[in-house]
Amino acid sequence: MSIIKAEIKMETAHEIGCKIEDLLQAAEKELHVMGGAKSGFQQAATRVEALQKQAELEEKEGKLSIDQYKVAKDWVNRAVGILRQLASAAESNEQQVRGKTIAYKQAVDTIQKVHLVEKTKATAAMAPPDTVVEGAEAGQMRDRVTGQHPGNPLGRRKRRADLKSVPAHQPEKSDDQADPGQVESPKTPPEVA
């Protein structure tokens, strides 16, 4: 893996992430605005509805004629209907902006993961080839770092483990053997790095 390619990808992911974070902040502000608009229209509708009771009271007191009361009631109902429609539209817009916000958050998370992967690749490419990943102990499987060779194949590692666990066999004794207590170990295949 080329370090330059990884650095270019990291920088690109960072720039895109910054722009999407700006869009996320704008969407969160818009979400608050839509929430405020929805509650404002709902409160206005309840207050305008209270005017209907006031018109009814004035009609009973004789300040308004029945015809005037009917006209006032009709206009108050229209105003309440309009305010409720505006509140409903604001709620719909709030849901739409909430969806945008969630999408932007997911995009930022994905871009952060891409940035981290590219950073890991660059770090692995700059590290010496014999470097072992942190936390990996002898004989323990380690996570593969992208951009690095994974090591010996699993079959070869198992054969080595089997050979280490098998006790060394004793060859037939010959007369020309100098030390009778010497044990010969089986030939192991050469290590491949």
Image (cartoon, rainbow, N blue to C red):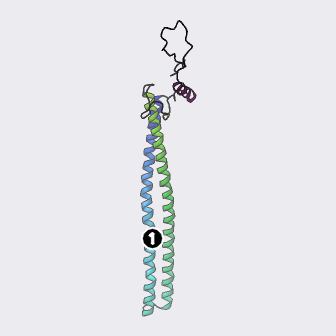
- In the figure, residue 59 lies in which quadrant? bottom left
Residue drawn at point x = 48 percent, y = 40 percent: 114
Q: In the displayed orientation, state which residue is furthest to the top.
A: 176
The magenta segment is 152-166
Total numbered badges shown on the rendered structure? 1
Q: Residues within 10 Å of mark 1 (few under 14, many from 20)?
A: many
- From the top left corner, tell me how far across and down residue 97 is, in percent: 48, 58
Q: Is residue 39 left or right of residue 92?
A: left
The magenta stretch spans residue 162: yes
- Considering only vertical position in the picture, is 137 above or below 46? above
The magenta stretch spans residue 46: no
Seen from the viewer's position, the closer of residues 119 and 164 is 164
- From the top left corner, tell me how far across and down residue 46 is, in percent: 44, 76
- Considering only vertical position in the picture, is 55 above or below 141? below
Seen from the viewer's position, the closer of residues 40 and 126 is 126
Residue drawn at point x = 43 percent, y = 56 percent: 28
Q: From the image, give the main secondary structure of the stretch colored magenta.
A: helix
Residue drawn at point x = 49 percent, y = 65 percent: 91
Q: Amino acid at mark 1?
A: Phe
Identify the element where label 1 is drawn: helix
Residue drawn at point x = 44 percent, y = 64 percent: 35
- From the top left corner, tell me how far across and down residue 131 is, in percent: 43, 27
Seen from the viewer's position, the closer of residues 170 and 114 is 170
Q: Which residue is mark 1?
A: 41
- From the top left corner, tell me how far across and down residue 182 is, in percent: 48, 14
